[in-house]
Each structure stands twice: as C-alpha cells, then as structure tokens.
Image (spheres, grey):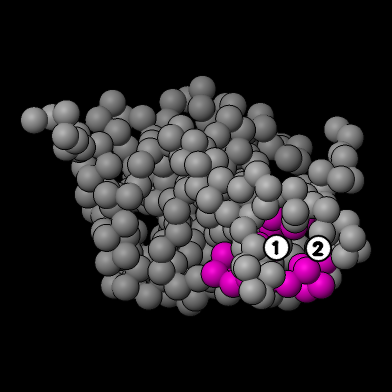
Amino acid sequence: MATSNPTLRVVGLLDVLVRCPHRGFGLSELAREVGISKGTCLAIADTLVEHGYLVQHAKTRAYRLGPALITAGQAVLSGFVDLRPALGALARVTAEFDVSCSVLAVDNDQLVVLERVGNPDPTYGLSQVGARMPFAPPWGAPFVAWGRATDVDGWLDRSLVPLSEETRRALRRALQAGRRLGFIATREIPPTHPAAVDLHRIRATAGAVDLAALRRLAAARLSEVGYFVDDLDTAATYQVNHIAVPLLGSDGRVLASLLVMMFGRHVTGDEIRRIGTRLAEVAADVVTLVTRPRVTPESF
C-alpha cells in the first residue's frame, strides 16, 4: 500500500508527543525529533492546534497533546471492554510480583494494547497503550487456546512465515498445554541470538511495527529458538518473556488477555506456576469488575 509522506510526518509528530505525554516540546526540538524542517513542523503543529489535537503554551510556546485526542481515544475504547473498574486489581498484582501488567484485545487481525499498569517496559514500544502487532503465531495465544478449533485454524493460517505440519502440531500442543495449566508462559529470546536485535528494535520503537523485523522474529521463535514453556518442570529455571491468561466472559468468549511482562527474568517453574495461577485468579476478578452493571443516575 502506498504511503503518503505528508501523512507520515503528521503521524511522526503525534508519535513523539504520545511517547512523552507529560512534557512539552518547543518547535526546534519537535522538528528535530520528527526529522523534518522547522517550517514543515510549524505548519503541521499549527493545523493540529487549530483543530484541538495539540495545545500550545501561551508563554513557552511548547506543544503538547490536545483535548481532541481525548474524544478520539474514548471513541476507540468504546469498541473494547472498559477496564477502568479493574485498574486497582491490576495495580495490586503488579506490586505483588514486581512486574508490568498489560491488557490486550483483538481488533480484526491485530493485537492492541488497551492498558498498562506497573513497572514500564525498559524499552517501551510493544507495551505502549495503543501499540499494535499482528495477531499471528506465536503471538496472541490466549485468544485461541481458549477459543474454538476454527479460531486456532485461522490463527495458524495468518502466520507471517510458512509453517510446516510439524510446527503446526507443536503449536497446537502448546495451546493445549497452556489451557491445561490455566496460563500461557513464554521464553525470552537469548540475548546472543541474531533475532534479539530485532526484538530490541521492535520494543524500542513506538508507533508502527517493522513487519520485516517481525517476520524474522516469528521465524526464529517458531523454529530454533522456541517460544512456549509447554512442558513445565517446577524444579527447572526458565528465562521468561511473559505469562498470560484470558479474560473469559460468561459465554466463554475471550474478552481480552491479561499479560505480565518478565523481561527475561530467570524464574523457576514453581514460580511460573504460582504467578500464572494468581494471574488467572486476578483475571476472574477483573471480568467480574468490568462486566458488573454500572450505576448511573438513570438507574434510580
């Protein structure tokens, strides 16, 4: 698909401000961060200010995100589960295990981060609220492990790289193992592996994900490196990327996925089981909170 350079400049400018929502940027600094001329930056920023997507400080002239984005964000979130009632529960689990907790949903064929609580990703990108990546193997396993057989088939067919029959069988076994355990645990990629460079680049980049890098990473994860901890030995030690569970609605449908990032922390199989079991309990509490009828003035 053809991409408009002027559109990319607007997106790049907004991405810079989204990464640092609590500070303002002067024109020169903003232009430098986006990689465009001051004149071009000024034209874009002034148009966004005019329409409420940015605000400009009256004295310092620094630019920050504007109120029109609140309306846009609320419109986007209205299509997903409302997590606001559950933020306290998520904060408690992050404090309990000293982890970062994210909530993901599926939007068509993409995974999207709806919320993040706790210690930030040291390289930020993939856990940024609003970040997206393909809903394809090996990512998004909780949505299919607790889904229907057709969900698994569709997920496998969306793979970014060709899958052998052996790999398809291995992925099905991993999904079945995760469902038996009650959680999905994944391995961190070894720092010396060539694909670790791609992982770091993806994590460090806010905004659009490099699809070529994702393909290389998927190929590594689905072949020689491995991804799932599907044969859990409680006495063994694992370098863990994340642990995830589904948020299951009353009809058994997966509403979202609750995920704790471990960032390569070395933990025993026993600790993985303990965290995964606790996370499943929290997920059940979260579902109760977010599906409980909300009291409004019209209720009385």
Residue 214 percent coordinates (x, y): 73, 51
Q: Which residue is outermost to the top? A: 150
Can residue 125 be seen in the rendering of this structure?
Answer: no
Residue occupying the point 74% across, 65% down: 201
Instruction: Tell how many labels.
Output: 2
Q: Nearer the viewer, residue 123 or 262?
A: 123
Residue 178 percent coordinates (x, y): 41, 47
Q: Which residue is outermost to the front? A: 58
Residue 142 percent coordinates (x, y): 45, 43
Residue 24 percent coordinates (x, y): 63, 70
Image quadrant containing the N terminus? top right
In the displayed structure, 213 sits above or below 119; it is: above
Q: Which residue is identified by label 2?
A: 34
Q: Which region of the structure is painted magenta?
A: 11-31
Is the C-beta separation of discs 2 and 1 under 8 Å?
A: yes
Q: Residues within 10 Å of mark 2 (few under 14, many from 20)?
A: some
| Main secondary structure along the magenta-highlighted residues | helix
Residue occupying the point 87% across, 39% down: 3
Q: Which residue is identified by label 1?
A: 16
Residue occupying the point 55% across, 34% down: 107
